[in-house]
Image (tube, rainbow, N blue to C red):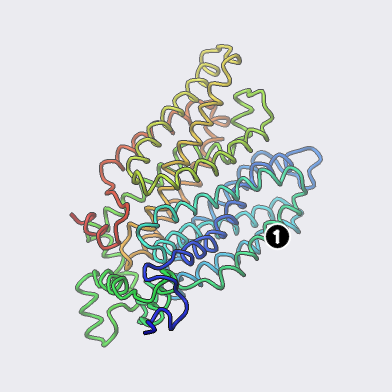
């Protein structure tokens, strides 16, 4: 007798296959590679733009403003995300994320003034804000619970690979050529991702249950996905009673696109939602005040101030390479050890490294001690910091963002997350140079502030964050509301 699987001729076994989950994850996260290009472009390009023979005149003030322009763009993007993901869908929203990147690199190709460069960076930051909000949501909804941790880590892997690509390429090609290469990668994303499926959660939200079932069959590689489909429906019905009553009274389906004001009210009034938002905002503070972003953006400044006897370009390339390698290693650990153990180890070690770096600069700047013989100690601390941060705190934020918010409030919650993240990013990008040079505090003060912030955030997260490894969205919401 011919069974249903063999009739369809698509699936090899009733256990299914993860092929489409892997493929969808890879194609989706190409956009994070492109966003990594935006962030990684800054450090090696500044070396060229600040050189005497630069085709565009750039002062130190212009350089910091251009770096901050990315964060400003990041801040303005999330409100648009809030509208797009529940109206246009997760897939189309990610496709739209690629459009500003095309404009960004196009402007850099034709740029002849710092204002055009700053505008391009602002637009690139806009895509960054969209991508970091939408990509975790999409992946969290298409990947099965047992793979969600490792697949979610690919966001950080691809982002770091984009940064590394810039460190390796930009020093050896012209500014325009590097922009052209990056534009080509965006086009590759748009072509590849156009063949990927929409989120089954979104399809159920808008009443397209048959399409959702077909998508689940493709993603899971099997024809019997009724249990998961019912779980998705059950998850989506866990919204406020007022929403259910108003939808019923108006004759609308309960899973229609949630009203943003109602979603905001749910964030403020529902214990689990408030807790989820607080958790992700702690991650934001840890992310931006953890010192790692400072080293990524101003690596050449930090290594020059240390007096490291290695070319600053080589140092920043080493940092970018370690970013990618350590995140790959963390991918194999996050679903084996869990989120919280990795977070605890990462935060503790990162704080220690920041104290070592701060102590070195303090001895140099405030005690007038010749520390040149010990320069490899803070340099090694930077290396360990990069590995520790990218093995825990940094990538886990993206995984948690994909897991922790109730489906009904994801759009509004990620908007709040994105805006606050952008604002804090602007502060950290600007405050480092201002504190270290303009205000005369030197390099030690910013790094000791980062150490305190890292330990404080890690302690708070260990106290309030539930372990999400292998759990469904429904189970996670129960833990948050407990």
Q: Is residue 362 left or right of residue 318?
A: left
Q: Is residue 83 visible?
A: no
Screen quadrant of the C terminus: bottom left
The residue beneath circle 1 is 107
Q: Could you tell me residue 339's position as x and y percent?
A: 35, 46
Q: Position of residue 288 (x, y in %)?
A: 46, 43
Q: Residues within 10 Å of mark 1 (few under 14, many from 20)?
A: many
Circle 1 — which element?
helix
Say which quarter of the image contains residue 172.
Answer: top right
Q: Quadrant of the N terminus?
A: bottom left
**Viewer-proximal residue, 380 or 426?**
380
Q: Residue 452 lies in what quarter of the image? A: top left
Query: Looking at this rendering, what residue extends furthest in the bottom direction?
Result: 251
Q: Residue furthest right?
A: 53
Q: Nearer the viewer, residue 421 or 333?
A: 333
Q: Residue at x 20, y 56 (%)?
A: 481
364 to the left or right of 4: right
Residue at the image position 37 percent from the left and 32 percent from the top: 348
Look at 27% across and 69% down and name the residue there. 235
Q: In the image, residue 300 lies at what x, y percent?
A: 63, 34
Q: Is residue 256 above or below residue 336?
A: below
Residue 71 lies, with reference to residue 318, above or below; the image says: below
Left-right relation of 388 to 236: right
Image coordinates of residue 217 in percent, x first then y, are 41, 74
Please state the total of marks drawn on the protein image: 1
Residue furthest to the front in view is 1
Which sits in the foreground, 14 or 309?
Answer: 14
């Amino acid at each position: 007798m011919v069974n249903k699987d063999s009739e369809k001729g698509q699936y090899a076994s009733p256990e299914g296959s993860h092929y489409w989950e892997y493929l969808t994850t890879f194609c989706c996260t190409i956009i994070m590679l492109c966003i990594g290009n935006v962030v990684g472009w800054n450090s090696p390009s500044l070396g060229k733009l600040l050189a005497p023979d630069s085709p565009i005149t750039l002062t130190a003030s212009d350089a910091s403003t251009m770096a901050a322009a990315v964060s400003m763009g990041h801040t303005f993007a999330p409100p648009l995300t809030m509208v797009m993901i529940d109206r246009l869908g997760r897939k189309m929203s990610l496709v739209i994320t690629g459009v500003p990147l095309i404009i960004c690199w196009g402007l850099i190709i034709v740029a002849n003034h710092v204002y055009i460069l700053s505008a391009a960076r602002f637009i690139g930051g806009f895509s960054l804000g969209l991508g970091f909000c939408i990509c975790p949501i999409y992946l969290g909804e298409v990947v099965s619970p047992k793979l969600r941790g490792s697949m979610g880590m690919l966001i950080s892997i691809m982002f770091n690979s984009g940064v590394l690509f810039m460190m390796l390429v930009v020093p050896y090609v012209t500014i325009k050529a590097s922009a052209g290469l990056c534009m080509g990668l965006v086009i590759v994303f748009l072509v590849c991702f156009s063949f990927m499926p929409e989120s089954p959660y979104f399809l159920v939200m808008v009443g397209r249950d048959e399409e959702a079932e077909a998508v689940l069959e493709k993603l899971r590689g099997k024809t019997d996905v009724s249990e998961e489909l019912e779980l998705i429906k059950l998850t989506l019905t866990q919204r406020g009673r007022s929403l259910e009553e108003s939808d019923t009274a108006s004759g609308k389906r309960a899973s229609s696109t949630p009203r943003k004001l109602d979603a905001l009210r749910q964030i403020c009034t529902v214990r689990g939602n408030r807790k989820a938002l607080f958790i992700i905002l702690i991650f934001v503070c840890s992310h931006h005040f953890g010192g790692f972003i400072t080293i990524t953006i101003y690596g050449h400044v930090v290594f020059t101030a240390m007096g490291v006897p290695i070319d600053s370009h080589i140092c920043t390339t080493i940092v970018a390479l370690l970013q990618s390698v350590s995140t790959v290693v963390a991918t194999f650990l996050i679903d084996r050890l869990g989120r919280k153990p990795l977070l605890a180890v990462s935060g503790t070690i990162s704080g220690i490294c920041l104290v070592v770096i701060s102590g070195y600069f303090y001895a140099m700047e405030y005690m007038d001690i010749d520390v040149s013989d010990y320069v490899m100690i803070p340099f090694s601390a930077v290396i360990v910091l990069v590995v520790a941060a990218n093995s825990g705190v940094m990538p886990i934020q993206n995984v948690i963002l994909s897991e922790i918010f109730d489906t009904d409030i994801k759009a509004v919650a990620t908007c709040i997350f994105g805006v606050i993240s952008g604002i804090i990013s602007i502060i950290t990008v600007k405050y480092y140079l201002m504190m270290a040079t303009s205000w005369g505090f030197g390099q030690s003060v910013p790094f000791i502030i980062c150490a305190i912030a890292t330990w404080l955030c890690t302690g708070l997260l260990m106290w309030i964050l539930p372990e999400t490894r292998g759990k469904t969205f429904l189970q996670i919401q129960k833990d948050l509301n407990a």
